[in-house]
């Protein structure tokens, strides 16, 4: 469906802000579920597997289920983005246990800069413009401020920050792969999402087994509730809402709102986990927000990748 509105109206803005809040709390949910007895890699597997089932049920109810499994030559490319998606969460879930949710969400939302840098080399129509280069520099400064927060105030480790940074890179490269592949960029959003969710599940399961993280022992009802939030609210419902938005509104203008997700993540970390919001972390958020705005300029192309992790 083509874009039908040229600007972000009140409806879209309210939906976007709500989605950004949901995505920001996602990183808190990972830490909270682990604290309530649900191992990180087991969380990642269950999130992907259960959300994939929900996508299939949703498509079936809409009468588009057969299209999800139609032979269209996209299998190998789809397997490629499934691996990248799995790599993202293999770094993100353990990494979030080693850093604070507040720092983690700021570092994770450097993913748009990986998209811009990767597309510069792999997508000829999306070469970096001067303002985007400035945005990348701002993002780099923002990450430096987040690292300074860790060095000065503790509450996490540079190893955790680095793992979340690698997750951001994998997330960004997944989007670049979709943009660069003629097979993938013409697929429906639901099929793209199913490749990522369903294809990553076996990989995440294998790593969870390797790390001895397949036990549910000690998981509290709160742990299951946090998993339900990650699966139903974030990985399923919010992604589908995002895909609806990008079929009705310009994706470049939508993406400019993603700077709100780290803001909500920092607030959720402080309110739910009792994390300290430092000046350095505030500066990190500011520079990342500026970078996102510069990278996602008014000429940004419409894309089919997801916006929330």
Image (cartoon, rainbow, N blue to C red):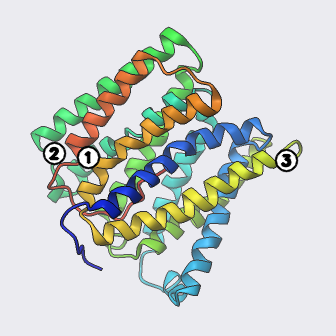
Task: Give the side of residue 233 with respect to residue 247, left or right.
Answer: right
Q: Residues within 10 Å of mark 3 (few under 14, many from 20)?
A: few
CB-based contact (under 8 Å), mark 2 and mark 1: yes
Looking at the rendered structure, the secondary structure element under dot 3 is: loop
Q: Position of residue 58 (x, y in %)?
A: 57, 78
Of 47 and 82, nearer the camera is 47
- Between discs 2 and 3, the one toward the N terminus: 2
- Between discs 1 and 3, the one toward the N terminus: 1
Q: Which mark is residue 128?
A: 2
Q: Which mark is residue 116?
A: 1
CB-based contact (under 8 Å), mark 2 and mark 3: no
The image quadrant that residue 122 belongs to is bottom left
Residue at 55 percent of width and 24 percent of height: 159
Task: Give the side of residue 110 with respect to residue 193, left or right.
Answer: left
Looking at the rendered structure, the secondary structure element under dot 2 is: loop
The extreme front residue here reads 10
Residue at 43 percent of width and 33 percent of height: 106
Residue at 22 percent of width and 49 percent of height: 121
Q: CA distance from mark 1 to mark 3?
A: 39 Å
Of 304 and 1, nearer the camera is 1
Asked whether residue 108 appears in the rendered view, the answer is: no
Residue at 41 percent of width and 16 percent of height: 279
Identify the residue under disc 3: 215
Looking at the rendered structure, the secondary structure element under dot 1 is: helix
């Amino acid at each position: 469906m083509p874009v039908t509105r040229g600007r972000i109206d009140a409806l879209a803005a309210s939906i976007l802000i709500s989605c950004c809040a949901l995505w920001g709390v996602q990183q808190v949910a990972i830490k909270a579920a682990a604290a309530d007895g649900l191992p990180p890699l087991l969380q990642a597997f269950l999130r992907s597997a259960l959300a994939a089932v929900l996508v299939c049920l949703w498509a079936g109810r809409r009468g588009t289920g057969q299209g999800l499994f139609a032979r269209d030559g996209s299998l190998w490319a789809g397997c490629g983005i499934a691996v990248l998606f799995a790599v993202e969460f293999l770094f993100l879930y353990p990494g979030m246990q080693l850093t604070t949710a507040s720092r983690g969400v700021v570092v994770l939302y450097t993913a748009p800069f990986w998209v811009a840098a990767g597309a510069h080399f792999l997508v000829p129509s999306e070469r970096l413009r001067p303002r985007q280069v400035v945005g990348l520099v701002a993002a780099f400064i923002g990450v430096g401020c987040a690292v300074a927060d860790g060095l000065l105030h503790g509450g996490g480790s540079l190893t955790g920050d680095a793992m979340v940074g690698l997750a951001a890179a994998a997330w960004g490269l997944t989007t670049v792969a979709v943009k660069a592949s003629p097979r993938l960029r013409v697929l429906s959003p639901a099929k793209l999402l199913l490749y990522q969710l369903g294809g990553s599940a076996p990989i995440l399961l294998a790593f969870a087994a390797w790390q001895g993280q397949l036990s549910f022992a000690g998981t509290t009802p709160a742990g299951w509730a946090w998993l339900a939030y990650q699966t139903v609210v974030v990985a399923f419902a919010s992604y589908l809402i995002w895909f609806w938005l990008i079929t009705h509104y310009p994706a470049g203008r939508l993406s400019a709102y993603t700077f709100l997700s780290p803001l909500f993540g920092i607030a959720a970390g402080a309110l739910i986990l009792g994390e300290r919001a430092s000046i350095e972390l505030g500066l990190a958020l500011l520079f990342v927000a500026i970078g996102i705005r510069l990278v996602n300029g008014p000429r940004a192309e419409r894309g089919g990748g997801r916006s929330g992790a």
